[in-house]
Every structure is written in C-alpha cells, then in structure tokens.
Image (tube, rainbow, N blue to C red):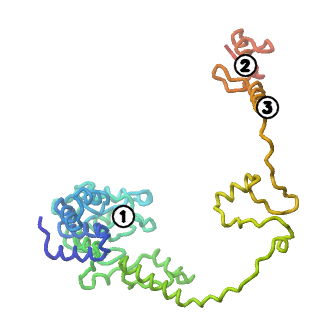
Amino acid sequence: MSFSETTRAQAREIIARYPADRSRSALLPLLHLVQSEEGYVSPAGVEFCAEVLGLNKAQVGAVATFYTMYKRKPTGEYLVSVCTNTMCDVLGGQKVYDTLAEHLGVGHEETTADGKITLEHAECLAACDYGPVMTVNYDFFDNVEPQAALDVVEELRAGGRPMPTRGARLCTLKEMAVQLAGFADERDGAVADGGPGEPSLRGLRLAEQHGVSVPGFDPKTPIRSKAEADRAAAEEKAKAEAAKPAPEPAKAVEPARPEAATGSTAPDVKAPDAKSPQVRTAETRQPDAGTAVPDAPGTKMPVDGPAPAPRDARAAEAAGAAANPPAGDGKPAGDAAGAQERNLKEAESGTGADGGDPADASGTGVRK
C-alpha cells in the first residue's frame, strides 16, 4: 500500500519532535499513524515505519506485536473492550462480555459482519474504582451492566455515537489513532463534551484542600530537544557561577606542631580521609605495625612477633587432626557410630533397650 502524502507529512512532523540521534523513539506514534490510515498495522505499515526511521522490518515488527493497541488484522470502526480482570470480573465484567459476545455473534478480537464492532476482553482497563468498565475506542463507560452494554453497541451499529461516562465524545478507531499519534482532535467541540468521574474529582478536591500541587509546572511548556536542554543547563550553571561571591584570599597560617596540637611527639600521619575507603576499612579491622594508630590512652602500637618454628606448626596440625577424626560411611564428621549400631541391633532383636515393646512411649526402641 502507498500511504498518502498527508500521512507522510505527519510522519515527518512526528520524527521532528525527537533529537536527530534518537529518531527511532518516534516508532510508537508512527505505528498509531499508519493504523489511522489502514485501521490496523499491516505489513505495508511495518515497512513504511522501517523506511522512514532507517530500521529493519524485524525491529518494527517486534514493537508492533508487543503492544495490544497495535492491531495486526483489520479492525472494526469501533473497538469495544470489556475488562474481565479480577475486580471487574467480581463486579460482573465477565457477564457483560459474555452477553455482548452472544448478542453480536463474535468472540475475542473478532469483528461483526457489518464491520462496525470488534469485541475484545481486556486484562485491565485501569479503572477498578469504576468497575465493571468497558471502553469504546479507549473512551470509558463506567459501572456497566449487560443491558447497558447492549444499548451502547446497538446505538453504534445504528450510526449513533453514545456519550461516554468520562472524556470527550466518541470517535472512530482511525480518528482515535490520529490522536494517539500526537495530533489534536480537529472535530468542532469534540473535547468540550463529557466530564470527569466522581473519584477523579474527589482526588482533585483533596489536593486543593491540602494544598498539593506540582511546583513550577506549566503544562504549556514545550518539550525541548536534548541539545537545547543541555545548552539551557550550561547557561544556568554559568549564571550560578557568576553570581557566587569572590572567595576571600587565604591567610597564611603557621602549621601547628604535633606536640602543640596533641601533646604528643609522635610523627604526623596523613589524614585518613585521604585514603580510599577500602584501605581505611582494612586498617581499622586489622591494624599492624605499619598502620597509624591514634595516640590515645590505652592504645598500643601492635608489634609483629617472631614467626612460629616449622616444627611447632607441624605439631599443631597433628594435634588438630587427632582431635577431629574423619567421617566414615557417609556420616557427618564428629558423629559417634555407637548409638546407630546399638539401635540397629535392638531393631534386629525386636526389643527395646529396656526389653519392652520397641514402640513404647520412651522412644528408645525401633519396631522391626
């Protein structure tokens, strides 16, 4: 398929939103753009995105198949999604979906014969406080019941556009894809309809009541490129440096003698902060004669003693080996075999240690 010149111009506009070295970030809105022309992301749409971004088709296809909003086969004019996840399911979402599926004669991701409705069950529509919910082209219908859902789809099939519970007036899936690509809804008064839900308003009221707001936020602030942001940051840094007062000239101070500072005649030692944390930690845990120790009462400088004679080391090794006999028969080292052998003999004779029932309450015997 050859895409229209309007689509190509919009693609160039989308790509221009991103820095030149990050143009592949435009892939997501571009996929919505090709879906707005075809109603789904076709192989031709994948090829188009790869062409304008300098990617290969495998890279584009990997993204298009990852997100459920990109449809890989022709979709109806209205995408009806019913949440069947845990919260909505408990509140009746599955019953709403089953009712629509039976009435329309379609299943998940199937389209009615007139091409009007594509039905799907959604894992979550992120509106648990309004459940059960369904969306039409991603606009919400809250607290729906089976009959109310049927009324919505029948009005859509008749050419009407029922008003969502929240948000602007309904549009087709292709029109919604244009908006998801980052372009405004050009229909007259389209965004003036609808309204927010009560839980959303409750959050706003609480924010106003407690003075919660985003400091210094201006929603009309344009998104700058990375080069512009770096340049602005450099300018701000230069201004901050220029505003700093000039440092006062340092006064010459005679270094204090060790005996004057600490009362000790020990030689000066380099400040520990000049050492790496690893060296400082090692010296703290294991000081030796080469480690500087604070000149404090009760603290002594460790002194290395003579190394042990070889014969002493051999004697210590032999004594340790004698005190720890090796394990045998797969038993842990140090286990005494006498108890196991006694229990085996008692089990074979069928008597316990006291000559009574081996399975008595004392637990000293083992039944054969």
Q: Which residue is mark 3?
A: 312
Q: Nearer the viewer, residue 101 or 196?
A: 196
Q: Nearer the viewer, residue 274 or 269?
A: 269
Q: Which residue is mark 1?
A: 145
Q: Position of residue 268 (x, y in %)?
A: 77, 67
Q: Amino acid at mark 3?
A: Asp
Please name the residue shown 69% across and 16% down the image.
367
Q: Position of residue 316 (x, y in %)?
A: 78, 30
Q: Amino acid at mark 1?
A: Glu
| Position of 182 relative to 108 (above/below) | below
Q: Position of residue 327 (x, y in %)?
A: 68, 23
| Callout 2: SS | loop
200 horizontally vs 137: left or right:
right
> Which tag, 2 or 3, sits closer to the chain's start?
3
Q: Which residue is mark 2?
A: 337
Label 1: few (<14), some or many (≥20) within 10 Å?
some
Q: Residue furthest left?
A: 2
Please name the residue shown 21% across and 76% down the image.
10
- The answer to whether one can see residue 151 in this image is no
| Callout 3: SS | helix
Please name the residue shown 53% across and 86% down the image.
241
Task: Give the CA separation, mark 1 to mark 2.
Answer: 74 Å
- The answer to whether one can see residue 168 in this image is yes
Q: Amino acid at mark 2?
A: Ala
Q: Nearer the viewer, residue 94 or 344?
A: 344
Task: Give the CA separation, mark 2 to mark 3.
Answer: 33 Å
Q: Position of residue 260 (x, y in %)?
A: 84, 74
| Position of 74 relative to 367 (above/below) | below
